Amino acid sequence: MGEQINGTSQDGKEILTVVSISNSGSSVSAAVCVTPPNARVSEQMALVILSERKTLSEHACKQAGIGRFKDKIIGTTLPHLVEHLAIDLLVERTLNAIRKSAKEQAYAGSVNHRIASIDARDTLSRIPPVSGHTRWLDKGLGTMNITLTFAAQDPEVVSEVITRAVARVNRLAIQQEFR
């Protein structure tokens, strides 16, 4: 295991660095360098991020067999956490936009008042699907690729959300010990 000091590598750089981001229509890929390459999510990091992002625990996850992310988060790679956090942020952004639009329509009187308090199932059914995949590009160099595939999302927004998720995981790594 590589040595780290307060969530940064020995040379003081951040644990995760975005090397490149590219988009191909309905997907955005980010190459992320992990220093040290064997950095993993600790139990403490998992507790912090799962308490901040309540819906993160319920994500479907295919790592080591189909299951829930809450059962796979401890010991996973930091880029895999970035993948799930980015998906969570995209879904939250979409939900907020749907809710805002419905409230504006209700206030304008163009729909009945039932819309102002949107049924959760109705809201969730209107969220375009987002999926992700994280894989090693070069394990020795600690480079992983995070790909998010989506419908009805602006690739620039997805790129921004991935960058925000990387920044959040870096802050979390600085604050917490990881294994």
Image (cartoon, helix red, strand yellow):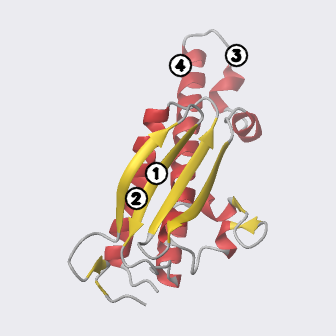
As shown in the figure, which amino acid type bears the numbered disc 3?
Answer: Asn
Report if the CB atoms under discs 2 and 1 are less than 8 Å apart: yes
Q: Which residue is mark 3?
A: 112
Image point 69% across, 75% down: which residue? 71
Which is nearer the N-term, disc 4 or disc 1? 1
Q: Amino acid at mark 4?
A: Glu
- The span from disc 2 to disc 1 (Cα, nearest Å) is 10 Å
Looking at marks 4 and 2 on the same chain, the residue that comes earlier in the sequence is marked by 4
Q: Which of pointers 3 and 1 lies earlier in the amino acid sequence?
A: 1
Which residue position is annotated with label 2? 166
Within-10-Å neighbours for mark 1: few <14, some 14–19, many 20+: many
Q: Secondary structure at mark 4?
A: helix
Question: Mark 4 against mark 3, which lies toward the viewer?
Answer: 4
Whether residue 167 is visible to the viewer of this picture, yes or no, is no
Task: Please name the residue that numbered disc 4 is placed on.
Answer: 104
Q: CA distance from mark 4 to mark 3?
A: 12 Å
Q: Nearer the viewer, residue 3 or 85?
A: 3
